[in-house]
Image (cartoon, coloured by chain):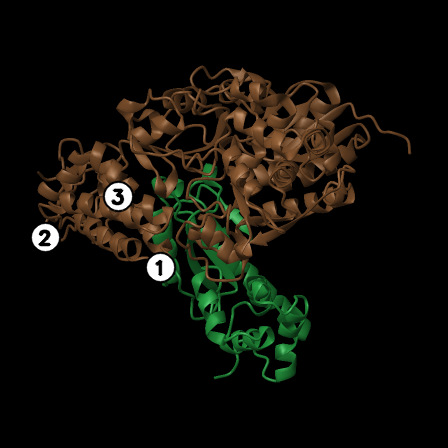
Amino acid sequence: MACVCGNEKQTLEAYYEPLKKVLGAYPKDERYLIPILQDAQEKYGYLPQDILQGIANGLGISVSKVYGVATFYTQFHLKPRGRNVIRVCTGTACHVRGGAEVLKAIENELGIVGGGTTDDLEFTLETVACIGACGLAPVIMINDDTHGRVSPTSVKGILDSYRQKQQESAEKRIKIAQ
Amino acid sequence: MKPTFYRSHVLICTGTGCKSSGASQIEAVLAKELEKHNLQDEIKVVETGCHGFCEKGPIMIVYPEGVFYCRVKPDDVGQIVEEHLLKGRIVDRLLYQELHTEASIPTYREIDFYKKQHRIVLANCGRIDPESIEEYIAVGGYEACGKALTEMTPEEVIAEVKSAGLRGRGGAGFPTGLKWELTRKTPSDKKYIICNADEGDPGAFMDRSLLEGDPHRIIEGMIIGAYAIGADEGYIYVRAEYPLAIHRLQIALNQARKYGLLGEDIFGSGFNFDLHIKKGAGAFVCGEETALMASIEGKRGMPRPKPPFPSVSGLWGKPTNINNVETFGNVPYIIKNGAEAFRSVGTEKSAGTKVFALTGKINNTGLVEVPMGMTLREVIYDIGGGVTGGKALKAVQIGGPSGGCIPAELLDIPIDYESLNEVGAMMGSGGMVVMDETTCMVDVARYFLQFTQSESCGKCTPCREGTKRMLEILDRICSGEGQPGDLELLEELGNHIKDTSLCQLGGSAPNPVLSTLRYFRDEYEAHINDKRCPANVCAGMGAPYVIDELTCIGCSLCARFCPMDAISGDKKKPHKIDPEQCIACGVCAGKCPVHAISQAS
């Protein structure tokens, strides 16, 4: 299978370069494992197996230890994620104000369930316990934007605006390429 | 440099609530408008932290008058600049309108929501620029720190906090002074102080707002605490989900270092102290102190048995003191104003104030700080403006997943640690979720248990297995398959889990179930015996729905939303539900504008 990023010429060295930088920013000590995982995920989008192995080698600890920590915290992802990450708040305030219906509407719209990623890697759908913007419940976050007072009927419009962004930038890329 | 005097200050709330309502856009437009009218040297725009009234965001306050504009849209900014800032005429239509009288209230001090609050911890939130240490110092910041380090011995600091009666604001209410004393008394070459800002309770955002709105207050509280216990290194453990709080803390730390408030020989006292930020990685259990320390050490965040308590053996085996954000937020006030002043607010056993995140089916959602001992009724009706849509209040959930539901008839109990424990809830970190008659209490209990069950770290059996079994029973009840004896089993399991869990996550996980069983048993029984959800929330229960032909206006709204296409009928004529196809989800009943649909008895 071809790489989804479309870049098949990337060398192994280039692939490990960001990880090297991350490891270089911290002393070789197990206590920095979590910040290293956080930084590595920021660079790679998720934590592939070879990166976990690379971190274990870099810190001189077993990969099982790294895997154990990476799977304990919900922030870490071992599978590729969509370009847009949707976080639906299922906190108390959102729950009471209809957050579950919003989630259902998004699931229907994208054809995936919470935790899943669409096949085209456009969207990843997650649920979070609380975004901390309860005053605006129900709330969803798409990437870094918070959308408050969302309703099942407004979901499609919101998602479309991100699809469009994607399309626009794709068109732009094509134009530039031409 | 020539000092600039501004004739007006425009404060824009840039807390997370207002930001997601569009505060950044407002700010950009305001900057443009000010420039257009050449006012940029006369009017200063200040980004502040949360004002607490998130419901009405984006919020803009114009000083010196203190005029409070709410739900400001980018299009409104031009008018505010032209009318108010240029001509001095208040823009009436953007003022806050009191809910019941509909009177426009110009200044925020007169708004009911703020009138009854007593702001000690939140005193600066929304009043100063959180990214400026100068503004914090200008309102008396770091004075307490100077006093403690130069005029008081560590023992005196501890004695002051003890006599103030400050108790942990993270939930359990352990006396802070005593905790400090225990850590102080453990001999060691190295000690740590930690601020627990791993605010994971769904429905709670006071730590976030405090860190975003007044980060220096927390840093000051931590320096005083570190001096008292003899720590030279500290950590602030913040959720990674709070990027703005982390960003502002980082700025504040750098400023404090630059001013010599962190580092070596602070205030020439010979006391050294520095602080690090540790980003959490998304595990609710890390709010538990031993799990939090494991997480700082780079391990899986799992709790360990106590004793040894952190005050004896904590982070990397060294004596460690952990307090909550709000607890540290109270410390500068106590040192500066004295224990007496602090004690004068609140009740005898619960001194001071408590910050609550008021959410759910309430008119004024937001952050409130009230004196301990105030009744729930005052908070919900006088400050919160009552239940939305004029519906009847059913219960108030306090303390998040560890807390309990307090029924409407107990609304007059005072808010303090003991009273809340007595009724089966707990102070918790301060989430207060209002529920009305359309909320199903069984569903709420299931919701919280689902949360704690999925956040259980899995180390001890009672929590890992017990919560799972309880959840299975609740799932069954909610889908109409409850059996006689289920409630007794839930109680038995719940009490065992409480007694035998390793940490407080498990120890309090059954609380939402046990407290709803105590006060809303009839709802559980309706689910089990009558296969009916009284609040019409639990889908797929019991008999199919029917349309009352006399009331139906034939709008066909129900038919459009029916997931099974079970509803038919001509426009403007009474519709019918096919009982064979109806799955009793209740969507139609919720959509019907004339309440013509109900479940067949």
Q: Mark 3 vs mark 1: give the one in front.
A: 1
Question: Which of the marked residues, 2 or 3, is nearer the chain's N terminus?
Answer: 3
- CA gap, disc 1 to disc 2? 47 Å
Q: What residue type is labelled 1?
A: Lys
Are circles 1 and 2 on residues that touch, CB within 8 Å?
A: no
What's under tag 2, amino acid-wise?
A: Glu
Where disc 3 sits, the SS reads helix
Instruction: Tell me the mark number nearer the camera, choosing from 1 and 2.
Output: 1
Q: Earlier in the sequence, mark 1 or mark 2?
A: 1
**Chain letter for the residue marked with disc 3 in the picture:** B
Q: Mark 1 points at which residue?
A: B459
At label 3, which amino acid type do we have?
A: Asp
Neighbourhood count class around disc 1 (C-alpha, 10 Å): few under 14, some 14–19, many 20 upward: some
Task: Tell me which corner region of the image, top left, top right, bottom left or bottom right, holds residue B394.
Answer: top left
Rendering colour (chain B): brown
Query: Element at badge 1?
Result: loop
Q: Which chain carries label 2?
A: B
CA gap, disc 2 and disc 3: 26 Å
Q: Mark 3 points at which residue?
A: B443
Secondary element type, mark 2: loop
- Residue shown at the point (47%, 65%) measured from the top left: A69
Q: Which of marks 3 and 1 is nearer the N terminus?
A: 3
- Image position, residue B372 (x, y; %): 45, 23
State the residue position of label 2. Answer: B580
Q: How crowded is mark 3: few (under 14 residues within 10 Å), some or many (20 or more)?
A: many
Above-or-below relation of A154 to A122: above
- Chain A colour is green
For the C terminus of chain B, which image quadrant? top left
